[in-house]
Image (spheres, rainbow, N blue to C red):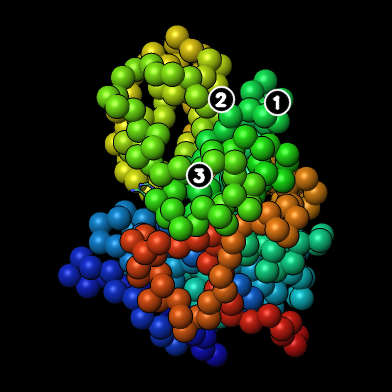
Amino acid sequence: MQKKALVVSLSNEQPQAQVEKIELAPLPPDWVRVQVAYSDINYKDALTLKAHSGVLRDYPRVPGIDFTGWVTASHDRDFQIGDQVAGIGREIGIQIDGGYQETVDVPGEFLHLLNGQRTLQDAALIGTAGLTAAIGLTKVLDTESMADRNAAILITGVTGGVGGWQLALLASLGYHNLTVITRQVDLKAQLLARGAKQVLTPEQVLLPALKPLAKQKFQLVFDNVGGDLLANLIPQVSENGHLVVSGNAGGIKLTTTILPFILRGVTLHGIDSVNYPHDDREEIWQLFETAFWPAENLRPASQKITFAELLPILTTFTTQAHFGRTIVKFRSRRPRF
Ligand SMILES: NC(=O)c1ccc[n+]([C@@H]2O[C@H](COP(=O)([O-])OP(=O)(O)OC[C@H]3O[C@@H](n4cnc5c(N)ncnc54)[C@H](OP(=O)(O)O)[C@@H]3O)[C@@H](O)[C@H]2O)c1
């Protein structure tokens, strides 16, 4: 039996991707085979096509760090044929073949059983982006800063997957003093409609000159961009404020000083969704069943593409402006078992 897959190989140190037909391998003990319904595009997926990004170590590899679908074979007693599941992050699409193929084989421990309200499509909308946003939020939700629904909160990279989920979660939890940063000024009206109070460009929050401490403007900053933007935001975090950092879409270098942390008691929370423990992930999925599932008008924007459209969109994903989540539809109809 064969399946269609997007395969990345290395040729002269350059990743090359193409759709191929590959053979189904025997399913190892404790592994589960899933017929893919949806996958998605995250920043990290796009990096698999970039030379020297360091994301992939072994080739050939099928990327796609997230997928949802139906179990078609199982060597793990926790999963039965016909179960609806989501595989989000972990080693998927990085150390083992991922979601950009018709069927995926993964260890059962990488799967979440969708046995609540969330559909296969909902779970793809969530994906790594939603999980990362939700983990970050749980780190600060019980802090004094967030006790006040009028807390001044800033989100960078808001048109992206993680930032879009941060806006969706914060707005639906009733936070209304939300400043969001985007270079896509044409999206202002859409971001205001999704709960932002103020839409600014990165330039509008840069300091005239980078200094250790500046006027205290934000109690919480959710940052997905890093680099110069984050360097300029750290001095503007208020006394006892929080920085939730999850991304580096704008760069990995960070120029800062110790002063905001020791003179203002600012706390920095680094988010790693990949190695987030299984039981804690299950708690996050539970939140997406309840308080963390926004009303439809507040959910992140999304566009659905076909597998045939995936490669060109993935190739330009980090350089082309986009808005919200990109969901890759393989099939929406339940297969026959
Ligand atoms: N820590 C974790 O576990 C984890 C999990 C998921 C993602 N991430 C990281 O989080 C980041 C965002 O991921 P994503 O999937 O949400 O990506 P994404 O959908 O591409 O969103 C990134 C957003 O950042 C903005 N941006 C990009 N380059 C920028 C620059 N040079 N200056 C200012 N803004 C810039 C863009 O917004 P505008 O076009 O509106 O300016 C873009 O929409 C990535 O670095 C990713 O690797 C980390």
**SS under mark 3:** strand
Q: Is residue 167 above or below residue 143?
A: below
Alpha carbons under labels 2 and 3: distance apart = 17 Å
Q: Tell me residue 300's x, y (percent).
A: 61, 57
Is residue 267 or residue 110 the one in the foreground? 267
The local crowd at label 2, few if under 14, some if 14 to 19, many if 20 or more residues have their Cα within 10 Å, is many
**Quadrant including the N terminus:** bottom right
Alpha carbons under labels 1 and 2: distance apart = 10 Å
The local crowd at label 3, few if under 14, some if 14 to 19, many if 20 or more residues have their Cα within 10 Å, is many
**SS under mark 2:** strand
Please tell me which residue is depicted at 59% across the width and 77% down the height of the picture.
329
Identify the amino acid type marked 1.
Answer: Asp
Identify the amino acid type marked 3.
Answer: Val
The numbered mark at residue 219 is 2
Q: Is residue 142 above or below residue 43?
A: above
Q: Is residue 64 above or below residue 201?
A: below
Task: Choose the circle earlier in sequence order: 3 or 1.
Answer: 1
For the residues bearing labels 1 and 2, Cβ distance under 8 angstroms: yes
Whether label 1 lies within 8 Å of ligand 1 gets the answer no
Please tell me which residue is depicted at 41% across the width and 85% down the height of the picture.
20
Q: Can the viewer see residue 40? A: no
The quarter holding residue 94 reads bottom left
Q: Tell me residue 91's x, y (percent).
A: 50, 56
Q: Which residue is mark 1?
A: 148
Identify the amino acid type marked 2.
Answer: Gln
